[in-house]
Amino acid sequence: MTSLLAQLEFDWSQWLVPFSRQWGDETFCSVLVGVACGVLGCFVVLRRMALIGDALSHAILPGVVVSFMLTNRTEISYLFLGALFAGVMSAGLIKLVSQLSRTKEDSSIGIVFTAFFALGIILASSLPRGTHFDLKCFLFGDPLAVGPNDVLMMGIVAPAVIVTIFLVYHRLKIASFDPLVAATMGISVSTIHYLLMGMLSATVVAGLKTTGVILVVAMVITPASAAYQLCNRLWTMLILAGVFGAVSAAAGMSLAFITNSPTGPAMVIVATVLFALAMLLSPQHGLVLRAMRRRGMRRHVDSEDCLKAVYKLDESGMVGGALEVARQTGLSPARVESMLRSLRAERLIERKGLAATLTPAGRRQAAELVRAHRLWESYLAGEAGIDMDNIHAEAERLEHVHELADEVEEKLGFPRRDPHGEVIPSREGPAEART
């Protein structure tokens, strides 16, 4: 294993070669495929049609083979109409099977696209020996085999897709987010569906030599999914998905030259890396920032628990040392020490040796926490009917939402004591606690 890994070679001097005059057309065609797939992918992702996208990419095979049989040409321009027809027909059959039988749509997709793909393989295998039809190139793509006709075809399809989306943007948007509302507004949801399937089929066919049918679905889904992690507006998502698709194609070409690997898979790897980064670093939905927010919330809760523990120890006439606070809160002594240092920095407590005492500001804040806790206990016991043995733990969780304490107090009729007989501090502070 180690010896095989040692044989991997990276030639970093090759990273600009895809952008040279020799390979410029191939790279440009791949970038157009990335943009068109990324933009279309937004609607595929929003409509939860990823499986249909995969189905279409496979179902066009018989159309490609039949077109080749009729023309004996492998240029995309000769294969386009047959593949487009097969793609739209498969989309129609999927809808027909799901409507006319008890079969669900996902099962219909599996039935239709595997049947079409199998038919295509049979047709391809029946070609006479010596016939030049590179099935491997069709399945896995070969951007370095792109010719002028392929570039021209993609140069027509990509702008046509962008312009069509721009012209029917509002219809596409409404039909994607709420088909029922679209139907009530007089929008033909079926027409929008077949239009989208037609554009998707055309893009898949035009980009066949770039990624092939096996990997093209990744270029449709992955850049759009990455954009979806980063924004909440469709226009922004469309732009980001197009950019991510273009970057995936261009950087994938560079990666392929650097590592001497197939270009189509390299593009998909770059797109996947972009998605992983978006998933981790998204400002709203990213895993890293979500973990940081959870950590900050946990620290906030622990800090308030320690502050409340010092208050309760002071109420009972005990010294609020770290060990006593740890016993009250169930936190480790090291965690308590960290929280007490933080509270001291916020000037909510003072330290005299091992003892912690509340400052006036700390006492007010701690009293608010105790007030919220005891009000929630009163609410849970009186209004929610929760058993007395369980209200303390639930109130411990709810007390940190102490901005709701005023509403709870008003609903309860301003109680003076909690279910355990403890005095509920007033909103103004412990000095004015009810007796």
Image (cartoon, rainbow, N blue to C red):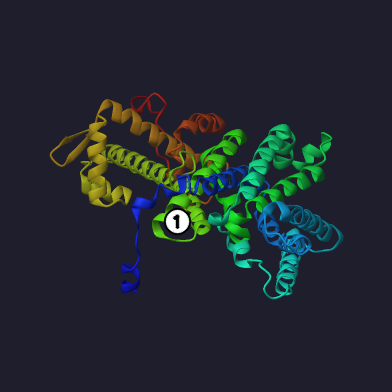
Nearest to the observer: residue 429 or residue 42:
42
Where is residue 130? Give x, y as percent: 67, 73
Q: Residue extending furthest right?
A: 100
Give the image quarter of residue 237.
Answer: top right
Nearest to the observer: residue 81 or residue 415:
81
Helix, strand or loop at disc 1?
helix
Where is residue 372? Give x, y as percent: 44, 35
Q: How many marks?
A: 1
Where is residue 231? Give x, y as percent: 54, 37
Tell me which residue sits at (48%, 48%) in the image. 22
Nearest to the observer: residue 357 or residue 75:
75
Give the image quarter of residue 362.
Answer: top left
Query: Where is 280 relative to 10, above or below?
Result: above
Q: Residue extending furthest left?
A: 353
Q: For this view, does 202 lie left or right of residue 180? A: left
Q: Amino acid at mark 1?
A: Ala
* Residue 46 visible from this viewpoint: no
Tell me which residue sits at (74%, 34%) in the image. 168
Where is residue 393? Give x, y as percent: 44, 49
Position of the C terminus, as image quadrant, is: top left
Residue at the spot of label 1 = 256
Q: Residues within 10 Å of mark 1 (few under 14, many from 20)?
A: many
Query: Where is 184 relative to 77, above or below?
Result: above
Position of the N terminus, as image quadrant, is: bottom left
Nearest to the observer: residue 230 or residue 374:
230
Tell me which residue sits at (62%, 44%) in the image. 36
Q: For this view, does 205 lie left or right of residue 309? A: right
